[in-house]
Amino acid sequence: AQTVTQSQPEMSVQEAETVTLSCTYDTSESDYYLFWYKQPPSRQMILVIRQEAYKQQNATENRFSVNFQKAAKSFSLKISDSQLGDAAMYFCAYRSFSGANSKLTFGKGITLSVRP
Amino acid sequence: NAGVMQNPRHLVRRRGQEARLRCSPMKGHSHVYWYRQLPEEGLKFMVYLQKENIIDESGMPKERFSAEFPKEGPSILRIQQVVRGDSAAYFCASSPSRGGDNEQFFGPGTRLTVL
């Protein structure tokens, strides 16, 4: 079974600064997807960024980028030029590449606060 | 194109009552997933359904919980004889097909409170 671990429960960043959120996972599969989701106080789950394990290039989406280290099973999220609207819970998630196992496995999440 | 809809958004039940949570997937999506989020926790997978079929129910408690996704109408997650430990946010997600490149789109969730 796959597991996702987010060991930092909380982090804080100054507005306009950069912050990195950590995530590790465990799997015996070679092909899979990794995701970062944002959950603001409204509780709506918003997909931030996605990485396919077979791609060596790290995914980027505007101010959001990942550092994917497949051998180390590490998948961290970097938020550049942090904004007040980035304050939320962030969840790392894993999904198998196989269509037979489509469920998402989430970490416990990290609460990010942004200081003005 | 409306997103995934869930209702009710908030549901209060007394112990022993039944809770019915509804999920209408995005138009064109025939795959539905239910997840539960306990306070201060991440989302935990419960069940995966395709129209009229349960594909994977490995995360759903064996007793009191059931789910369906009929040919017509929304998917329903049903909790019988609710207990305080069922208090949580229940999220539904939908996708157009199974696995692969398909993203799961989440609804806003139903927050169940058991008194």
Image: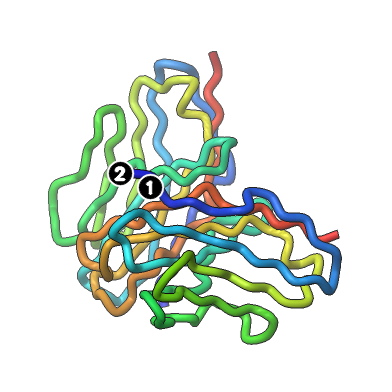
Q: Which residue extends farthest bottom?
A: B62
* Numbered circle sitting on residue A49: 2
> In the rendered image, which quarter is residue B27 located in?
bottom left
Q: CA distance from mark 2 to mark 1?
A: 5 Å
> In the rendered image, which quarter is residue A55 located in?
bottom left
Residue B65 is left or right of residue A98, and the answer is: right
Q: Amino acid at mark 2?
A: Ile
- Residue B77 picture location, percent across and down: 58, 70
Quadrant where the image shows the C terminus of chain A: top right
Residue B115 lies, with reference to residue A63, above or below; the image says below
Q: Amino acid at mark 1?
A: Trp
How busy is the neighbourhood of tag 2: few (under 14 within 10 Å), some, or many (20 plus)?
Answer: some
Tell me which residue sits at (29%, 56%) in the image: B103
* Numbered circle sitting on residue A36: 1
Q: Which residue extends farthest front?
A: B72
Tell me which residue sits at (81%, 71%) in the image: B17
Q: Chain of mark 1?
A: A
Q: Are marks 2 and 1 on the same chain?
A: yes
> In the rendered image, which quarter is residue A115 located in?
top right
- Residue A95 picture location, percent across and down: 33, 65
How busy is the neighbourhood of tag 1: few (under 14 within 10 Å), some, or many (20 plus)?
Answer: many
* Numbered circle sitting on residue B69: none
Tell me which residue sits at (48%, 43%) in the image: A90
Residue B40 is left or right of residue A69, and the answer is: right
Quadrant where the image shows the N terminus of chain A: bottom left
Residues at badges 2 and 1 in contact (C-beta under 8 Å)?
A: yes
- Mark 2 or mark 1: whose residue is earlier in sequence: 1
- Residue B14 picture location, percent across and down: 85, 64
